[in-house]
Image (tube, rainbow, N blue to C red):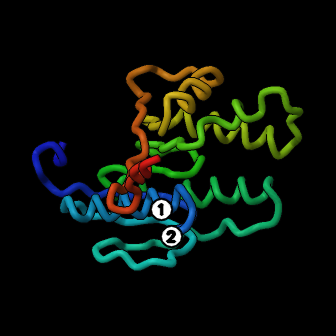
Amino acid sequence: SAARRGGTVRVGLVVRRLSAHGGTERFTLGFARALVAAGHDVTVHCRGADVDVPGVRVAPLDGWAGRGRILKGALLERAAARVPRGSAGVTIGFLRAPGFDVLRAGGGAHAAWMDGRTAGLADRQELARDARALRSAGRVVFNSEMACREALAHHPLAPERVHVVRNGVDLLRFQPDTCPAP
């Protein structure tokens, strides 16, 4: 691939919002910055951004404002389906919708959360959307062994498509305190 040869890769990131607030949003923001720093061409497809990242294009992900989980989920899936797939060298999804080259399933699987709970209509639709997203992704990246195990217990995925990449820690921001002397 071009990335392995040191060339520029067109990367499309799909997330609800590009922001410095929220776990997935902050992760995506840092990932976009790292990709730009490595010389890649980055477009973030999202509902909006409250940060400006030099070198990152923001493309609107319109058409999924709605009320209620059922409508929002269906509209979100439809909006994500409109993200151009062939125009990016790789499309990475940070939300549950089918068809991404790479799906970052940071929260595991909705089915694992549902264990022992009664599924209403919204949950059944979310379970189906989750299954479509996991089944259709070229690769699925989990941020922990636990999330990976839980998802695999509910969704059989080929082992070569599944990866665990733990979240990094900003060591400039988070430094262990030294213990005070007794």
Up the image or down, 8 lies above or below 61; here it is: above
Disc on the earlier residue, 2 or 1: 2
The answer to whether residue 159 is left or right of residue 72 is left
Location of mark 2 (residue): 19
Q: Nearer the viewer, residue 87 or 143?
A: 143
Q: What is the quadrant of residue 121 in the picture? A: top right
Name the outermost residue toward the front: 182
Where is residue 74 shown, x and y percent of the image? 71, 54
The quadrant of the rendering that contains the N terminus is top left
> For the residues marked 2 and 1, what is the alpha-carbon distance in whole angstroms?
6 Å
The answer to whether residue 23 is left or right of residue 4 is right
Residue shown at 72%/37% (left/top)?
A: 127
Where is residue 45 shown, x and y percent of the image? 47, 65
Q: Secondary structure at mark 1?
A: helix
Residue shown at 32%/61% (left/top)?
A: 172
The answer to whether residue 95 is left or right of residue 129 is left
Residue shown at 74%/59% (left/top)?
A: 72
Residue shown at 69%/37% (left/top)?
A: 110
The answer to whether residue 56 is left or right of residue 151 is left
* Other residues around mark 1 within 10 Å, as few (<14) / some (14–19) / many (≥20): some
Q: What is the quadrant of residue 84 in the picture? A: bottom left
Q: What is the quadrant of residue 80 in the picture? A: bottom right
* Other residues around mark 2 within 10 Å, as few (<14) / some (14–19) / many (≥20): many
Location of mark 1 (residue): 26
Residue 164, labelled with which disc?
none
Q: Nearer the viewer, residue 180 or 162?
A: 180
Name the outermost residue toward the left: 5
Where is residue 25 shown, x and y percent of the image? 51, 61
Q: Secondary structure at mark 2?
A: loop
Badges 2 and 1: C-beta atoms under 8 Å apart?
A: yes
Three-letter code for the amino acid on which mark 2 is drawn: Ser
Three-letter code for the amino acid on which mark 1 is drawn: Arg
